[in-house]
Amino acid sequence: MHNLGTVMRFEITRTLKKKSFWIMALGFPVLMGAIFAIIYFSNQSTSDASKQLQSEHFSLEVTDDSHLVSKQLIATVNAKVVAKQQGIEDVKAGKVDGYIYYPADLAHRSIEAYGQDVGVFKNDRYESVAKYLLSTSVESSVNEQVRAVIAGKTSADVSTYRDGMPYDSTMQMIFPGVFLVLFYFLIAFFGNQMLTSTTEEKENRVIEMILTTIEARTLIVGKIISLVLLALLQAVIIIVPALLGYLLLHDHLHLPALDLSSLPVNWPRIGVGFAIFALGFIMFTGFLVLIGASVPTAKEASQFFGMVMILIFGPLYAASLFVSSPDSGLVRFLSLFPLTAPIPLLLRNAVGNLAPWEIAVALPILALTGLIMLALAVRVFRFGALEYSRKLSIKEILSLK
Amino acid sequence: MQFGSVKVINNLSFSVKKGETFGLLGSNGSGKTTTIRALLGIYPPTSGELLVEGKPYSVAGDVRLGYLPEERGLYKKESVIDTMVYFGQLKGLSRDDARNEATAFLERVGLADKAKTRLDKLSGGQQQKVQLGITIMDKPDLLILDEPTKGFDPVNRRLLMNIIEEHQKKGATVILVTHQMEEVERLCDRIILLKDGKAAAYGTVSDVRKAHDGKSLDDIFIEIYGEADKEADNA
């Protein structure tokens, strides 16, 4: 692996010099931050506006066949009790801003609200006031405990045990689950770069200069390690602002307290998660580089990206099956077929339903497939990369010596 | 050397002596570039051996090789100096030495002001000069130049000839793959003419000329490949 450091330095430096890398690296956290900010402020302003609507004064008439709405409350908001037909007619005639009808059977019929049009958002005031009058009336007629139950504000502290020891399945998922997130992140962000990493040498006709200066294996390994380091840099660029944001704003935004020290650390599962992640990543990197080396241009390589993404992330659509039916034939197949295996294996390892025998079979399958992919990728790059203008067929790839 | 059912190089045997300039000549498709690629291990030979100083060529070996391939190309989006320093380091130079060598070469060929320019902003001829600079920057023992003057104007062709001569004088072995008989007459000690992957003529320039009634290399070339063209026409 002579010159590995030189290749890595060159690949990393030139990537860091590209505007597109920084647009992607900084754009993602900025975009996510902007989206969360918009959602937060939108919810906040909707909530504020909703509260404001409830307290907004407008002329109102009410009919209460349910007998649940407090007459005192109706009087407090200066509403007038009228017959249903009159209320509707008054609204139509513009004599009153709004009218609310509470039917006798609220369990099966809707409250009816009529009002003057005051615009898309402000028209919600009729529904808001209707619900406010009803809920406040009902809540005031029961005690605090019943009120909490009705409002869904009760909570349950669950303690679960395994082999007599406290065991929280959800918390156990967190550390092994990190590898699933990391795998998804690396492939989603850098898959296309892996796919096109060797096409540049082809498109620029620099293959012969390279192959007489450096081993193909060193070049490819150098490129892969560089991409991993760049992906980790990208992860840091996303995680650091998120952590800083959390530390600075978690009180202000009412975010839950995060206490990492209380998370359970299951070393065997973390170890298996790391092994699946590393072997799966190597296998897909080899696969992507192999495709890239087999086609003449980055554009053609990109056409295969969708297919690879379906293989990798398609199993996510069966995520609930992996959790609920680990013994089904489909789950077993997807977990052991190398090109679909990483996501099911990582997910099942995180939730803790991966049997020891499956680990013993799956890890060698991933390792062997990864080695074959990498060896084929190096071979194709070495001996097939001079095919500047055409795709290599599978037969040609397998027959390269 | 065979691709599928097509034999590109057939029963070819020749040697290049250390320190000489050897001309590998032939018409398009005669197998010159394939021979060089097989020599450098880019193509594995179907049978036989191609050796450099008694061993198959390996990038990890002791031989300092400068190869200017027929297919020209560099990392187009990188600057001239970064690309030259990268290749210099791959060839075993330190970063500083690679930068010094690159700077000296660029000054010599009139591209000093383009050092920080992206390669795709240079003309084709300027890019070729950069590629030549990369080829010779580690002062190679063996210099293989495949159609080195292709695309050069007469001024730059002369400059290139001078650079090759300098390396000859320093004792480098040079293999020149070319169609330009003027270059061959001026630079080569011995030559081989390939036809259909076989040697049609092989020896010193004067021996080859003597064997063809003292004709010029141009005439010998036309004689050999003209016959090939006639055979092709008859077929």
Image (cartoon, grey):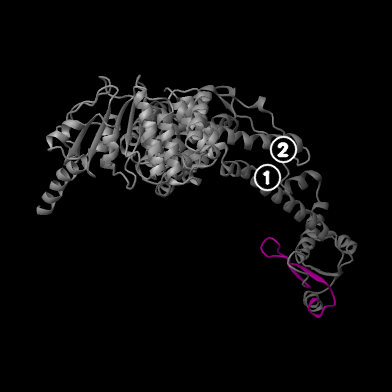
Question: For this rendering, which residue is in front, B33 or A35?
Answer: B33
Q: Which residue does the numbered mark 2 point to in the structure image?
A: A245
Which percent across, then down, holds residue A96?
Answer: 84, 74
The chain ID associated with circle 1 is: A
Q: Is A183 positioned to the left or the right of A289 in the image?
A: right
Q: Is A203 positioned to the left or the right of A59 in the image?
A: left
- Whether residue B111 is visible to the viewer of this picture, yes or no, is yes
Which percent across, then down, holds residue A76?
Answer: 90, 61
What's under tag 2, amino acid-wise?
Gly
Residue A57, quarter of the rendered image: bottom right
* For residue A61, above or below residue A1: below
Which percent across, then down, holds residue A299?
Answer: 42, 49
Give the quarter of the figure containing the C terminus of chain A: top left
* For residue A234, above or below residue A54: above
Does the stretch in magenta take in B61?
no
Q: Which residue does the numbered mark 1 point to in the structure image?
A: A33
Answer yes or no: do the residues labelled 1 and 2 have beta carbons within 8 Å? yes
Q: Secondary structure at mark 1?
A: helix
Residue A267, quarter of the rendered image: top right
Give the quarter of the figure containing the N terminus of chain A: top left
Q: Quick check: do tags 1 and 2 share a chain?
A: yes
Rendered residue at 14%/46% (across/down): B228
- Whether residue A361 is visible to the viewer of this picture, yes or no, is no
Magenta segment range? A91-116
